[in-house]
């Protein structure tokens, strides 16, 4: 007779069904205790799933290597399974639920034989908050368990919550054979269910993250009138103790994590700002009784990209990942510490690369390509509590009030360093038309613009036209909606050099954003929105030539008219479902641009 630490019948039935399907050798319930975690870490080391790192230099840290073809999210194997194809929209791969269950069942069948099945009750958001969502992940991966213990609140407290309210997302995961040809990441928003099989990569298997907190949550948020967004949340505190919070959406690889925990630049030190990190990836926002938008980060950890993380790009993260961290696909050094391309310090003379092979700088593969020590998407999983800038409001049920929403993209041209939308509806248009140029790291033609509305293209769990409609409706529910801005840290000159230094200097732009929110400065009206008067940006300690400033803020009519063609093409994909208001915004912008001088 199986032991169940719950009386929740729905949960017991579901665990029994999963067990009959996957046939594990035994079932272990995760209770969230320190004792259990330490035992599981030992087990993972003994089985070779993790390597314990240098206890003095990296206390509580481990290294894990994934299968070589299982190193990032697999969007082509990710599906939204709804009764109607239309509800998934042109932005998602779609499968009929019955077909999806059948296909995946064949892979799950017996997949856990001679393995342990772990049951992880978890809460996204503080346990018991009306803001939070409960999930239970069943998995045969210890790596998943140990990551979930960092990324979410898990264990007995969540089970107690499930005694009161039996609403939870059923998350089923099995590594199965880690076969890319038998890999499926399936979302059933109508059943509040996620099935992931055949992968061991975080984004595909830590089901509380992208799968629940964005895809499933975005679907629930529309129904329940709140917002689940791919946004960082940070607070800026003035010396008088006043803190304002900003939520910002950028496509992957645009420095979201770095921005979330930036250190004020030398030139602004005299102003005594402090930055508070609330989250680096996901923001759940709702309208509170004061008529403004309040946000929580439903996670408790960072799942960040290691390459490029160093004391210049992100000193707070360097501090965070010194302990209690799981590293995935980085280089192992002879002293049992880790390294990646773009890390602090010297390039090690040798080590073991992310594939487990001996490595030296500049060694080449059979094709003559340099072999990297760490995979470009190597990751660390680390508790937010370790972060020197972690917000003291992380566990507050109400979250933090949002003064501004910032959208951003990676654009060499077209988008100026910063502009402000005219109003909420125009801001939704700005978010809906967000785009980034492809870099060498992505498949496709370099420089080609990929539209990624609100940075949600891979994460919106339903038809994006309905998502835009939801954004428009949310604006109507707020007495004090946040102002909406767009930034571009990546504008280049005629030689392809970045015009703006980025990183901590971005605080100068956030300062202007808050000045606008507090009606402290005026702005210039242009066809695309309000732009700063250059003298309103505090450039103390950053002497950029005025010609550079001019280029950073330039709105080029010809470039924008070209941009409009791309936007039009993108909007047309949504056919008749596209909200009329966004076409109105499109038409109005086109008119303003036509009338614009240069
Ligand atoms: C992530 C992503 O891993 O957005 O956070 O790809
Ligand atoms: Mn992300």
Image: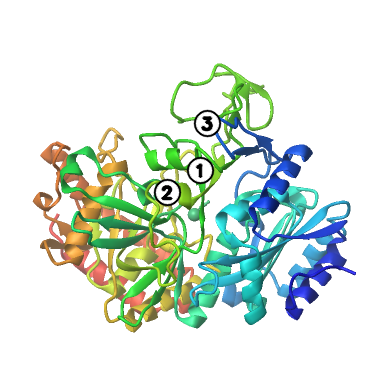
Please tell me which of labels 3 and 1 falls first in the chain: 1
Residue at (47, 52) in percent of width and height? 384
Residue at (25, 38) in percent of width and height? 493
Q: Is mark 1 within 8 Å of ligand 1?
A: yes
* Element marked by disc 2: helix
Give how far apart the Cα atoms at labels 2 and 1 are: 9 Å
> In this view of the protein, can residue 243 be seen by the observer?
yes
Residue ID for mark 2:
257
Residue ID for mark 3:
340
Q: In the rendering, at what x and y percent does residue 352 appear?
A: 64, 25
Query: For residue 592, which quarter of the picture?
Result: bottom left
Q: In the figure, is residue 49 to the left or right of 432?
A: right
Q: In the figure, is residue 325 to the left or right of 318?
A: right
Considering depth in this image, is 534 or 584 the residue closer to the camera?
Answer: 534
- Any mark on residue 375, and which? none
In this rendering, the answer to whether 198 lies above or below 380 is below
Residue at (23, 59) in percent of width and height? 241
Residue ID for mark 1:
305
Where does the C terminus fall, quadrant-wise?
bottom left
Colouring used for the render? rainbow
* Element marked by disc 1: strand
Q: In the figure, is residue 143 to the left or right of 401?
A: right
Give how far apart the Cα atoms at labels 2 and 3 are: 17 Å
Please tell me which of labels 2 and 1 falls first in the chain: 2
């Amino acid at each position: 007779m199986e032991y169940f630490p719950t009386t929740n019948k729905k949960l017991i039935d579901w665990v029994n069904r999963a067990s009959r399907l996957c046939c594990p050798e035994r079932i272990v319930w995760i209770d969230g205790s320190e004792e259990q975690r330490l035992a599981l870490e030992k087990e993972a080391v003994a089985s070779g799933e993790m390597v314990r790192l240098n206890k003095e230099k990296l206390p509580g840290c481990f290294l894990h290597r994934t299968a070589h073809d299982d190193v990032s999210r697999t969007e082509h194997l990710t599906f939204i399974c709804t009764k109607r194809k239309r509800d998934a929209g042109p932005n998602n791969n779609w499968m009929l639920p019955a077909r999806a269950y059948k296909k995946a069942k064949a892979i799950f069948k017996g997949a856990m034989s001679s393995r342990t099945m772990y049951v992880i009750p978890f809460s996204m958001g503080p346990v018991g908050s009306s803001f939070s969502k409960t999930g239970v992940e069943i998995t045969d991966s210890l790596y998943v368990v140990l990551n979930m213990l960092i990324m979410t609140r898990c264990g007995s407290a969540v089970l107690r919550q499930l005694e009161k309210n039996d609403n939870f997302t059923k998350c089923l995961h099995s590594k199965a054979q880690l076969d890319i040809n038998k890999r499926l990441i399936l979302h059933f928003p109508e059943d509040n269910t996620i099935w992931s099989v055949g992968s061991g990569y975080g984004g595909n298997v830590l089901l509380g993250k992208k799968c629940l907190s964005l895809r499933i949550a975005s679907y629930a948020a529309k129904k329940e009138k709140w917002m689940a967004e791919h946004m960082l949340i940070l607070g800026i505190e003035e010396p008088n103790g006043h803190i304002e919070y900003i939520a910002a959406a950028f496509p992957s690889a645009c420095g979201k994590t770095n921005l979330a925990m930036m250190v004020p630049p030398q030139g602004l030190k005299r102003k005594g700002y402090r930055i508070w990190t609330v989250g680096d990836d996901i923001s759940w926002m709702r309208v509170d009784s004061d008529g403004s938008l309040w946000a929580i980060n439903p996670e408790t950890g960072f799942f960040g990209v290691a390459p490029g993380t160093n004391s210049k790009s992100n000193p707070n993260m360097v501090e965070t990942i010194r302990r209690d961290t799981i590293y995935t696909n980085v280089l192992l050094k002879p002293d049992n510490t880790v390294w990646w391309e773009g890390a602090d310090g010297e390039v090690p003379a040798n080590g073991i690369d992310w594939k487990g092979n001996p490595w030296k700088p500049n060694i080449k593969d059979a094709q003559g390509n340099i072999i990297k020590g760490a995979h470009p998407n190597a990751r660390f999983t680390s508790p937010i509590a370790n972060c020197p800038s972690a917000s003291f409001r992380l566990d507050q049920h109400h979250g933090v009030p949002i003064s501004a929403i910032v959208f951003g993209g990676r654009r060499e041209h077209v988008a100026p360093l910063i502009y402000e939308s005219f109003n909420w509806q125009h801001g939704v248009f700005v978010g809906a038309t967000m785009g980034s140029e492809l870099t060498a790291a992505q498949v496709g033609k370099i420089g080609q613009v990929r539209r990624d509305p609100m940075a949600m293209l891979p994460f919106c769990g339903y038809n994006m036209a309905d998502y835009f409609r939801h954004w428009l409706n949310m604006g109507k529910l707020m007495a004090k909606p946040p102002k909406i801005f767009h930034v571009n840290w990546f504008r280049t000159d005629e030689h392809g050099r970045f015009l703006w230094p980025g990183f901590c200097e971005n605080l100068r732009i956030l300062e202007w954003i808050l000045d606008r929110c507090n009606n402290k400065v005026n702005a210039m009206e242009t066809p695309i929105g309000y732009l700063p008067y250059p003298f309103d940006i505090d450039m103390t300690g950053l002497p950029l030539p005025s010609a550079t400033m001019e280029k950073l803020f330039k709105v080029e009519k010809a470039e924008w008219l070209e941009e409009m063609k791309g936007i039009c093409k993108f909007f047309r994909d949504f056919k008749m479902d596209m909200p009329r208001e966004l076409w109105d915004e499109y038409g109005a912008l086109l008119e303003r641009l036509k009338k614009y001088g240069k």
